[in-house]
Image: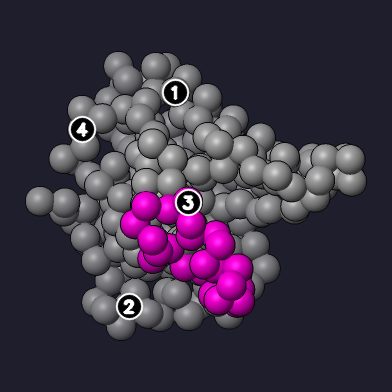
Amino acid sequence: MFSLAGKVALVTGGSRGIGRATAEVLAELGAHVVLTYVGNEAAAAEAVTAIERASGKAEAVRLDTADTESCDKIIAEVAKRLGRLDVLVCNAGISIDALVVRLKDEDFERTLSVNLKGAVACSRAAIKVMMRAKSGRIVFVSSVVGETGNAGQTAYAASKAALLGVMKSLAREYATRGITVNAVTPGYVDTDMTSALSPEIREKMLVGVPLGRTATAREIGSAVAYLASDEAGYVTGHALRVNGGMYM
């Protein structure tokens, strides 16, 4: 079960956090993983080395998902060079938080460009390849905030909610071509940001989580891996909640 042997997977924002954990899980299942990064080349190289040390196959490519032309170019080049593209994980994202009365237009537009327009551009490029193969898996990394909203995160919530609409539309458009399109909506995840919070803030944050803890990045990556697998072949247009029960 859950073998991705011989397949090629591209993970945007794959140098750290959820993206890196996802890349590691996909590589463990046998995929050749291409992970993208924007500026932290050292972190990307470290992620590739970690995968290779675990006997996996990986490489890193620089890509700013806000640059839609680069999305088309990079994905087409990867598919041509490796001969295929079976899995696309749209994980790259940013969060510029502010109450809406203080939210700058440029910050709102930058958030949508990276989180939403970039995901659409990458999907469009991947679909061109996947249609020829009559097979493919696209997984968006959305957020529980896209379902519930959150004070101070209007731009982020808007981008993540919009991803769910994109996911459902693409699932309908390309189901007959053998392409499934799904999403995961993580809740609180163990990241550099959450680990830096004080015990008091973490405790308050977890009050609304029935499981009483944050998720590990690997738990999110494993959910993505399921949606990328053959076993999920009859799952499309679905948002898989990995949030410890904080939103049901």
Task: Kindly indicate the quadrant of the structure image that contains residue 134.
Answer: top left
Q: Could you tell me if the residues under marks 1 and 2 are in contact, i.e. CB atoms within 8 Å?
A: no
Looking at numbered disc 1 in the image, what kind of residue is underneath it?
Lys
Residue for badge 3: 208
53 and 193: which one is in front? 193
160 and 87: which one is in front? 160
Label ID, residue 168: 1
Is residue 145 in sight in this rendering? yes
Q: Nearer the viewer, mark 1 or mark 2?
A: 1
Looking at numbered disc 4 in the image, what kind of residue is underneath it?
Gly
Residue 2 lies, with reference to residue 47, above or below; the image says above
Helix, strand or loop at label 4? It is loop
Q: Could you tell me if the residues under marks 1 and 3 are in contact, i.e. CB atoms within 8 Å?
A: no
Residue for badge 4: 233
Helix, strand or loop at label 1? It is helix
Which stretch appears magenta? 190-216
- How far apart are the two marked residues, 4 and 3, measured between alpha carbons? 33 Å
Residue 166 lies, with reference to residue 78, above or below; the image says above
